[in-house]
Image (tube, rainbow, N blue to C red):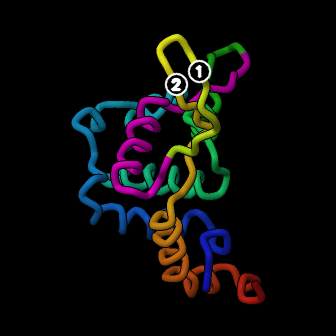
Amino acid sequence: MTTFFDVPAELLNSAVADKLSDVDKISRPEWADFVKTGVHREKPPVQSNWWEMRCAAILRKVGREGPVGVNTLAQAFGGKKNNGSKPNTPAMGSRHIIRTALQQLTEAGLVEAKELKTVDSDDGEQKLYSGRVLTASGHKMLDESAHSVRSAAEEMYPGLSKY
């Protein structure tokens, strides 16, 4: 069986975005039409399905790098900020977009928070988390999408057939 590690991201993300559009818990927020995806961007995205594409990319990154947190994902979705005549500086992506997408993916049952340990505090016991990881259903969705785009990936990249 083909796993999501075996196919390129550009093919996998579009296939996962198509599946995520059918999930009821994943929906574009009202503010998503007016928001930029980071401080390094000048305008909001123009794609009609950019929210599903971002959720698919986040799901793939959580699967590959998990347990992963919001700040790590914001750095991954960042870019170079144009400072005019000054040198460009690194900029993070929008943490609010990533946080909202992770909350929707958690409600859909595709991602869960991995508990690190429980500590005692003045308020009682608190749970500490090391980040988000894929659930079994999230892993299954990624692998099914990867299997569906495997033939297109082999046409684009002939060397993939030996893996």
Query: Circle 1 sits in a helix, a strand or a loop, which is it?
Result: strand
Numbered circle sitting on residue 120: 1
Is there CB contact under 8 Å for labels 1 and 2? yes
Q: Dot 1 surroundings within 10 Å: few (below 14), some, or many (20 or more)?
A: few
Q: Which callout, 1 or 2, points at the residue further toward the start of the chain?
A: 1
Spatial CA span between label 1 and label 2 = 5 Å
Give the labeled residue for mark 2. Answer: 125
Residue drawn at x 51%, y 55% is 59
In the rendered structure, does residue 94 fall within the stretch colored magenta?
Answer: yes
Give coordinates of residue 9: x percent, y percent.
Answer: 59, 63
The quarter holding residue 15 reads bottom left
Give the image location of residue 108, x and y in percent: 35, 55
Q: Residue at x 67, y 51 (%)?
A: 65
Of 155 and 142, the residue lying toward us: 142
Give the magenta-colored segment's residue range: 87-112
Corner quadrant of residue 1: bottom right
Q: What is the x, y in percent for residue 101?
A: 40, 43
105 vs 79, left or right, is left
For disc 2, the neighbor class at 10 Å (few under 14, some 14 to 19, many from 20) is: few
What type is the residue that disc 1 sits on? Answer: Asp
* Amino acid at the residue labelled 2: Glu
Instruction: Describe residue 57's horizontal placement relative to residue 157 as left or right.
Output: left
Q: Residue at x 35, y 31 (%)?
A: 35
User: Is 147 situated above or below 41?
Assistant: below
Q: Name the residue at 48% across, 75% down.
A: 145
Q: Is residue 96 above or below residue 160?
A: above
* Quadrant hosting residue 85: top right
Above or below, 98 against 111 in this view is above
**Image quarter hosting the C terminus:** bottom right
Secondary element at tag 2? strand
Q: Is residue 111 magenta?
A: yes
Apparent side of residue 139 relative to residue 43 in the rendered image (left or right): right
